Image (cartoon, rainbow, N blue to C red):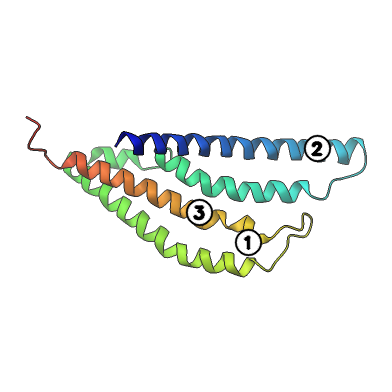
Amino acid sequence: MSVIKRIAGFLSKLEEIFLVTCFSVIAIALFLQIIFRYFLNAPLIWTEELARYLLVWITFFGINYGLRRKKHIEMAYFFDKLPKAAQNAVTVLTQIMILYLMWKIFGATMRFVRAQMNIESSAMQINMGLVYVALPIGFITSSISILISAVKFVGELIPHPNKG
């Protein structure tokens, strides 16, 4: 089990580095755009497009980042008023519903990505399928995180005979 934890920790760190790098590249690109447009009077045509595409990647990797850290919004006021057994049931039901929704959307995202494979972006001339492949990757990584979380949560609910 410690091998899985180490792999998960490594992937988590890699994801953080990726997200910070994407944000940094967006900031640098937009700063360059300001410099070139207003001070050099020679606007760059690719910076806005790059920022937009990186934002797509940040969004879909950010879903998983938020899930693993329990940073997504929730209605804690109502949840906290429920008895503990009901809170557990709502937690499991919510995770099942999110998984169902992600897998339902996954097929549509794959069709969308395939449809984008023959299209090139206007400024950067990159394959749009590469831009939007972030959607299924984000759904897969988020689904894995939810499954791991659900298994841990249900494991904590089940009484173990060894524990006294």
Measuring from the top left, give residue 144's x and y in whole percent. 38, 49
Residue 117 seen: yes
Q: Which residue is mark 1?
A: 129
Q: CA distance from mark 2 to mark 1?
A: 26 Å
Q: Which residue is mark 3?
A: 137
Say which of 44 and 162 sits in front: 162
**Type of amino acid under label 3:** Ile
Q: Residue at x 39, y 52 (%)?
A: 143
**Type of amino acid under label 2:** Leu
Q: Which residue is mark 2?
A: 32
Give left or right: position of 65 versus 123: left
Q: Quadrant of residue 27?
A: top right
Q: Residue at x 77, y 46 (%)?
A: 47
Q: Nearer the viewer, mark 3 or mark 2?
A: 3
Measuring from the top left, give residue 26's x and y in whole percent. 69, 40
Tell me the quadrant of the picture where the C terminus can be found: top left
Q: Residue at x 63, y 36 (%)?
A: 21
Q: CA distance from mark 3 to mark 2?
A: 30 Å
User: In the current view of this chain or complex, which residue is farthest to the right?
Assistant: 41
Label 1 Cα neighbours within 10 Å, binned few <14 / some 14-19 / many ≥20: some
